[in-house]
Structures are given as structure tokens and as C-alpha cells.
Amino acid sequence: MNINDLVRGILNGDKRSIARAISIVENSDDEQRKNIIDKIYDYGNSKIIGITGPPGVGKSTIIGNIAPMLSKSGKISILAVDPASPFSGGSILGNRIRMQENLSKYDIYMRSTSNRLYEGGLSEYSWDIIKILEASGSDFIIVETVGSGQSDIDIMNVADLTCVILAPGLGDEIQAVKSGMMEIGDVFIMNKMDREDAYISIKDIMESLQISNKPNTPVIGLNSLTLDNYESFIDFILKWNGKNTERRNIRKIRQIIIERIFTTYSVYIESVDKNKLLGKNPYDIADDIMRNLDGLKNKYLEK
Ligand SMILES: Nc1nc2c(ncn2[C@@H]2O[C@H](COP(=O)(O)OP(=O)(O)OP(=O)(O)O)[C@@H](O)[C@H]2O)c(=O)[nH]1
Ligand SMILES: [Mg+2]
């Protein structure tokens, strides 16, 4: 498939073209990524909904429930970022298959991607994947982060609406979650309201929001077994009109530049004269290498 056919396919919402383009941005080089993004950049206007929170609180369950409900108001795509860890591979795949079966009747496109140990709860090319899903005509793109608790904070740089999902009985983990996640939520969801300690947990979160100077941030309780109170959450999502394009793009620019510097300088670092390594302070060697910025320019700009 040539690039123009691929782009036409994406713009028409063709699922095979979308899947192929995502594989290209994940597995090719900067130039090919740039090529695709160049051609689709101006298309689409999606609301990007981030679903984050500790492991097992019900993120996937909630997405599986809200996606069909939201599909009454527009086209939905889902991006689920999975941990690279081989230990959880099997169970996650099982979850995904169940979710995909459930969603297929609603014409919802779902893609999972591994974070490949990229930190922050998203994957390295999440931005590019989101651009592709956006150009394919999605009205809503729902992103599930890895679910490693307090370190899943990158989503706030990417989503237009960040939903932090919590559940009763998180035990000691709640303290760690609070220290990282209270800042990033536009809304807090207490899932598993069927649990008896749920109301105490909601009160606890409200108190933490007071302390964090965010007393007006909404807290919504959900029971994902009965779908109790889901209409409040859907209503909240539909009314939300915050946009985060600037922050999303700045994050991407930073990432592109760091990646380029890293790739280029790795080569220089490997080529350091081994005799120098013993005789010279590493700070001085790093300065020497960085004086040679020409390598970076030649590689990316002088074509
Ligand atoms: N009792 C109860 N269980 C729930 C509720 N929502 C989800 N669960 C269960 O909680 C477990 C974890 O749900 P998931 O949706 O996989 O949670 P997750 O946050 O996506 O988990 P990871 O992606 O592994 O971090 C599953 O067994 C669900 O059936 C709820 O409202 N009440
Ligand atoms: Mg999940």
C-alpha cells in the first residue's frame, strides 16, 4: 500500500489502513512517522478521554461500559496501553479479547499497544496513534493507561479530560496514589460502589481534594456491575469542553528532540576513545561530545 492510499484509507476510517498506519508509526523510523503525520495532521477533531488509576480498579470495565453509551453521540476509538511485563501478558490478552468481542457490535475501533517500558503510563508513540485515530474521524478517543498507580501521570499531558479511577480497599496504595494522582484528575471516579467501604472512600477522596486545593473537582461514584450512576459520568463527559492540544504538542516536541539527541549521541558515546575514559573526567568527555552538534543537524535538518 503506498502512502497516499494509506492516508486515504485512514481518512475514510478504514480499519485495516488505521491498523497498518499504527504499526508503521510504532515500528519505523522518524522519517516515516513524519511522512504519515504530515499528511493527516490537519484532519479531525476528537475529544481525548484519559482513563487512569491503579491496577484492578476497573478501568477496562468502565471503558467497556461507557464506549457503547458514548457511541450514541459520536464515533469512538479506544487505545489501551499495556505493560511490557511478560508476567501479565496472558491475562491482559484475555481481557482484551473479551472487550473487543463486546465492542465489535458497536463498530468501535480498539487498539492495544505495549508501553515497552516507556515511563509515565503511555507508550512512546501514543501521540502519533492518537493523531491517526483522530484523522480517522473519531469523535471520542478513550485512552487507558498502563495502570501502575502514581507514575501514570503522563496522561494529563495528552488527554483533554483526565479521569482518575479509584476503588475502595486500595489499602496502603491509596497514599501513593494520592501523592501522584490528585493533581492530574479533572474528575475522580470511585468505582465498585457495591463495596461496603465505598462511601468512606469517597469521603476520603473529597478530603484529599480539599487539601490539594481542588475542592470543586467532581467525584462520581459508579457501580460497574449494575451500571448505577453511569448516566452522570456520561453527562459529565459530554458537557466537558476542555482542550489540551497545546500541552499535547509540547510534550511531543520535547519527546522528538530528546529521542533525536539520544539516538545521535549514543553513536558518539560508543565511539569515545577508550583511553580517554580512564584519563578524563566523564563531565569533560560529555562536554566534548556535545560541542559536536553538527552531527545532529546533519542527520535531521540538512537533507
Ligand atoms: N465488585 C465490583 N467489581 C468490579 C467493578 N468494576 C470492575 N470490577 C471487577 O474488577 C476487576 C478488575 O477490573 P478491570 O476492568 O480489569 O480493571 P483495570 O483497572 O482495567 O485493571 P488493569 O488494567 O489490570 O490495571 C474485574 O474482575 C472486574 O470484574 C464494580 O463496580 N464492582
Ligand atoms: Mg485494564
Image: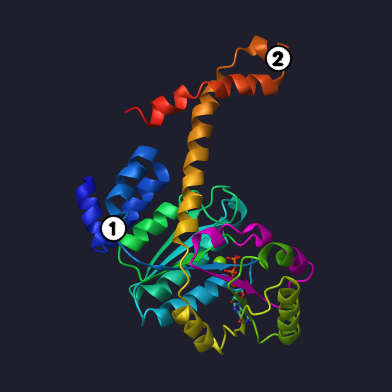
Q: Can residue 273 be spotted in the picture?
A: yes
Answer with left or right where residue 136 lies relative to residue 207: left
Give the residue displayed 49% in from the left and 28% down from the top.
264
Question: Where on the picture, by quarter, is residue 203?
Answer: bottom right
| Residue picked out by circle 1 | 16
Q: Position of residue 213 (x, y in %)?
A: 71, 72
Q: Which residue is mark 2?
A: 280
- Assess whether residue 149 is covered by the magenta stretch: yes
Provide residue 111's location: percent of width, then percent of height. Answer: 42, 61
Give the answer, above or below, for where 176 lies relative to 293: below
> Which sits earlier in the primary sequence, circle 1 or circle 2?
1
The answer to whether residue 169 is seen in the rendering is no
Vertical arrangement, residue 257 with respect to residue 155, above or below = above
Look at 23% across and 58% down and name the residue there.
Answer: 9
Question: What's the residue at 52%, 39% (across, down)?
Answer: 258
Tell me which segment is drawn in magenta: 147-176
Q: Amino acid at mark 2?
A: Lys
Q: Quadrant of ligand 1?
A: bottom right
- Identify the element where label 2 is drawn: loop
